[in-house]
Image (spheres, grey):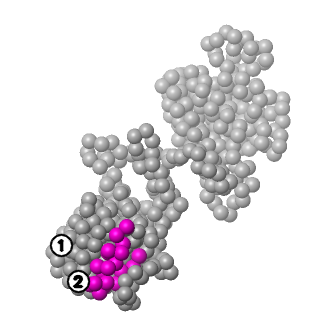
Amino acid sequence: MKKYALISVSDKNSIVSFASDLNSLGYNILATGNTFNLLSENKIDCTEIRDFTGFPEIFDGRVKTLHPKIFGGILMRRNINKDLLEAEENEILPIDIVCVNLYPFPKIVDRIDVTLEEKIENIDIGGPSLIRAAAKNYEHISVLTDPSQYSDFITDLKRGNVSEATRKKLAYAAFSYTSFYDTLIANYLEKEFDQTKEAFRMNYKAAFNLRYGENPHQRAFLFGNFENYFDILHGKELSYNNIVDLSAAVELVNDFKEIVSVIIKHTNPCGAATGTDVTDAYERALSCDPVSAFGGIVAFNSEVDESAAQKLNEIFTEIIVAPAYSEKALELLSQKKNRRIVRMKKSADSKEYQVKSVAGGVLVQEKDNSHFDDSALGLVTSKKYSEKEFEDLKFAWTVCKHTKSNAIVYVKDKKAVGVGAGQMSRLDSTRIAASKAAQFGHDLKGAVAASDAFFPFADGVLEIISNGITAVIQPGGSIRDEEVIKAANEKNISMVFTGIRNFKH
């Protein structure tokens, strides 16, 4: 009996050599239009699908494989007599190998230069049906969906047997492939057609396994297109904790337009400052808490030059991330073997969702894309802030937004000088921030303070004022706001409400 293999591929990498190998192993190849043309041009013996089915491709190729002779040949069960009799009665021949990959919808879905109509035309219909049919009948069919599978498959075939384990592996890969493809389409159409989100579809391909998770006894994996956002220029592979901290550092540093350096430790900023250049910004950021900075992540929103690299080499840091590095800076920074040097290629999409797993499901929320709005700022005290205080308040608010709740951040001259993060009591965060400032010699007289949420009592504000703080920025919204405002007025400081809470759990 003749042996048949069906080939219909959009990604034509290695397909000619694969088809040639199949020919040499006695397979008759059935191919669709463009695939048939390519194989024929390369002297591969093959039959066009329409000649096999006796039915032409129609509607500009929208229909070409959807035919009983094709799907019957794929779905027939070779070990069931009824199927074999029906196949014979209907002149259906068994197809043992299906090699299909899909129209390139994933490559164009996010392109703004491609129209909706073009994107719709790049939604494959027959291809997923062929793949799913072949994968469903894995007991008898081998289904290949990626050029990376060809070589090992041909090796097995030359040995005379494709094992059931291999067919199962290929079937799993096939369903994963169509699932990814369909999810991408559903997510796109949901957004494009402004539909209510009735399902949350995760759609990330495996990138690589991590050494371990937060702790060595936890397995961890990275999924998605991490490489689209970061280049690892030097150093060993990133760990789970590295990636979490790296993301936190980049999110904070990208919230500023001026030259800024931030230092992150366990997702919290232990340093942040503007500067006249990257070296100045880094030195000012480091001064906030040089002890915690050891082993941290340093991020920049400007190119790192030789001068900054020399300063960075004075202490150990796990990761340095920036949009660019001078040639000399990269040479100097690469002298530290255990340090990772990362280039930030682009910012994350502000429309992405944040996901946390919970019992029985996931919590999903939009990213916190809030920005400081000058026009929405409400002065609630008798004393008005100065222009300098206003600039410091804006800086403090942005750093506080990226600090774990309960958060208090002290800022002076657009430099963080004390950070209290992640405490159960806002009063404790206030005291910790002041203690950190005192530990590293920062004078809080004339500094400003930011709080990520309202003060539930006046005690937190009074504690802040006792340290010499002259202006406070907070969301407001407490039932005791008047009590808090009164305390600020009595101590003659300025206070502004933003109306925006920035909890970060």
Can residue 225 be seen here? The reply is yes
Give me the residue at 37% from left, 67% from top.
479
The front one of 268 and 301 is 268
- Residue 429 vs 2, above or below: the answer is below
* Amino acid type indicated by mark 1: Ser
Residue at the (62%, 50%) spot, across then down: 196
Mark 1 or mark 2: whose residue is earlier in sequence? 1
Give the x, y percent position of residue 111.
63, 60
Where disc 1 sits, the SS reads: helix
Percent from the top left, x then y, of residue 8? 68, 38
Residue 72 x %, y %:
72, 23
Q: Which residue is mark 2?
A: 468
Q: Nearer the viewer, mark 1 or mark 2?
A: 2
Q: Quadrant of the C terminus?
A: bottom left
For residue 140, what is the image quadrant? Answer: top right
State the residue in front, 332 or 242: 242
As displayed, is residue 256 above or below residue 17? below
* Residue on which the image places disc 1: 435
C-alpha span from label 1 to label 2? 13 Å
Which residue is at 26% across, 84% downward? 491
The image quadrant where one finds the N terminus is top right
The number of discs equals: 2
The residue shown at (63%, 25%) is 96
Q: How far from the left and from the top, in percent, is residue 240?
A: 34, 52
Question: What range is drawn magenta here?
Answer: 479-497
Which of the pair 173/459 is nearer the observer? 459
**Residues under numbered marks 1 and 2 in contact, where contact means CB atoms less than 8 Å apart:** no
* SS category of the residue bearing label 2: loop
Residue 215 belongs to the span the image colors magenta: no
